[in-house]
Amino acid sequence: MKKITLGLSLFLLLIQNGFAKSDTEWNKLIDNESDEYWKQSYKCDKEALNHKYSGNVNECLKSIVLQRKKPNGRLNITITYLNTGVLYQYSTKNYIKAYQYYIKAAKLGNIKAQSNLDILCRQHSWVCKQ
């Protein structure tokens, strides 16, 4: 029952995040959140979803640190790994780091990360031969 509740909570959170498209909406989510864990997670989501070509990958790296410290932090880490890979690929052009984070997310079952790996390997085949 606990797993179902956690899964449903994550699903609702993802839906909420998916509809928050403008920076104003993201900032409202961030400002209204009292838990530093979720606040940082929203910052990472905002960077990857709204600013993938110019976003700050450090927001996602900070989120990973917080998630590793929190007992239920693993719940959101696959999405954060995916977002970190997106920012490394598009904003910093660090394709090796992007590949490493996509692999982490894909191993945890993130389908979008698997898709991004395919795209990355088609665009920059040398990265996937590491």
Image (spheres, grey):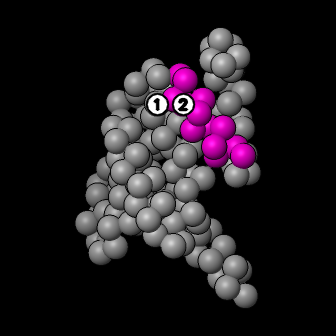
Q: Are marks 2 and 1 in contact (CB under 8 Å)?
A: yes
- How many numbered callouts? 2
Task: Locate residue 24 relative to residue 93 in the image: left or right.
Answer: left
Residue at 67%, 85% in the rendered image: 2
Asked whether 83 falls inside the magenta stretch, the response is: no
Using a 10 Å C-alpha cutoff, classify the residue at mark 1 as few (fewer than 14 neighbours), some (14 to 19) or many (20 or more). many
- Specify the label residue 35 is tagged with: none
Amino acid on which the number 1 mark rests in the picture: Tyr
Q: Which residue is mark 2?
A: 98
Task: Locate residue 36 relative to residue 128 in the image: left or right.
Answer: left
Asked whether 101 falls inside the magenta stretch, the response is: yes
Q: Which residue is mark 1?
A: 88
**Looking at the image, residue 62 lies above or below residue 15:** above
Coordinates of residue 69 in the picture (x, y in percent)? 44, 65
Coordinates of residue 104 in the picture (x, y in percent)? 63, 43
**Looking at the image, residue 115 lies above or below residue 110:** above
Region in magenta: 95-107
State which tag comes first along the sequence, 2 or 1. Answer: 1
Residue at 26%, 66% in the rendered image: 31
